[in-house]
């Protein structure tokens, strides 16, 4: 992808990826936070712990995790930017948090609960950068 294309890409929401400048398609960690008092992990990163109010530190989650549930979206919600059909998966990270996210098309078409997936920088619609899940080792 050219530099010109990269400059038009905007994160759907700032701070989801540990590296917001990661080019689309690259394996990228999600940016979460961990409470320094009670160890609660939250995504997206919080300013304070939502359980105990304690201070948090930013952490990059593991890039590999386990798919524990999935579905396919065939009817777009209002104002949707991602074209249907698309896959959504719930992924359990080693840090003890489960996070919903988009599946890449290859994973959507051969999806199985229990497989290892990796997080990547996903251009989910033209100009819109977010995170997604794909089969581990796919890049
Ligand atoms: Zn806490």
Image (spheres, helix red, strand yellow):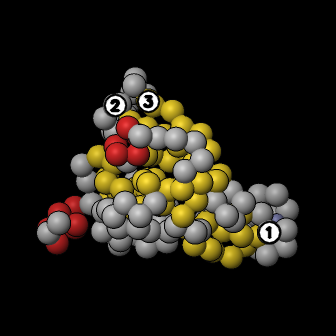
The quarter of the rendered structure image containing the C terminus is bottom left
User: Is residue 6 at all visible to an observer of this figure?
Assistant: yes
Query: Which label belongs to residue 73?
Result: 3
Front residue (pair 112, 128): 112
- CB atoms of marks 1 and 2 within 8 Å: no
Query: Which label belongs to residue 134?
Result: none
The quarter of the rendered structure image containing the N terminus is bottom left
Q: CA distance from mark 1 to mark 3?
A: 34 Å
State which tag comes first along the sequence, 1 or 2. 1
How many residues crowd mark 3 within 10 Å: few (<14), some (14–19), many (20+)?
A: few
* Residue depicted at x 50% and y 47%: 101
State which tag comes first along the sequence, 2 or 3. 3
How many residues crowd mark 2 within 10 Å: few (<14), some (14–19), many (20+)?
A: few
Residue under label 2: 84
Could you tell whether 6 is left or right of 19 in the image? left
Q: Secondary structure at mark 2?
A: loop
Task: Point out the frontmost of discs 1 and 3.
Answer: 3
Q: Secondary structure at mark 1?
A: loop
Residue under label 1: 39
How many residues crowd mark 1 within 10 Å: few (<14), some (14–19), many (20+)?
A: some
Total labels: the figure holds 3
């Amino acid at each position: 992808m050219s530099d010109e294309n990269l400059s038009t890409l905007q994160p759907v929401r700032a701070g989801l990826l540990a590296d917001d400048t990661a080019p689309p398609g690259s394996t990228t960690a999600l940016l979460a936070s961990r409470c320094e008092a009670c160890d609660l992990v939250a995504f997206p990163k919080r300013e304070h712990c939502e359980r105990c109010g304690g201070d948090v530190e930013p952490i990059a989650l593991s890039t590999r995790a386990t798919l524990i549930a999935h579905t396919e979206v065939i009817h777009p919600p209002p104002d949707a930017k991602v074209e249907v059909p698309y896959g959504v998966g719930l992924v359990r990270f080693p840090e003890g948090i489960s996070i919903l996210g988009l599946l890449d098309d290859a994973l959507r078409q051969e999806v199985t609960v229990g497989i290892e997936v990796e997080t990547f920088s996903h251009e989910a619609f033209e100009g819109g950068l977010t995170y997604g899940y794909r089969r581990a080792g796919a890049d």
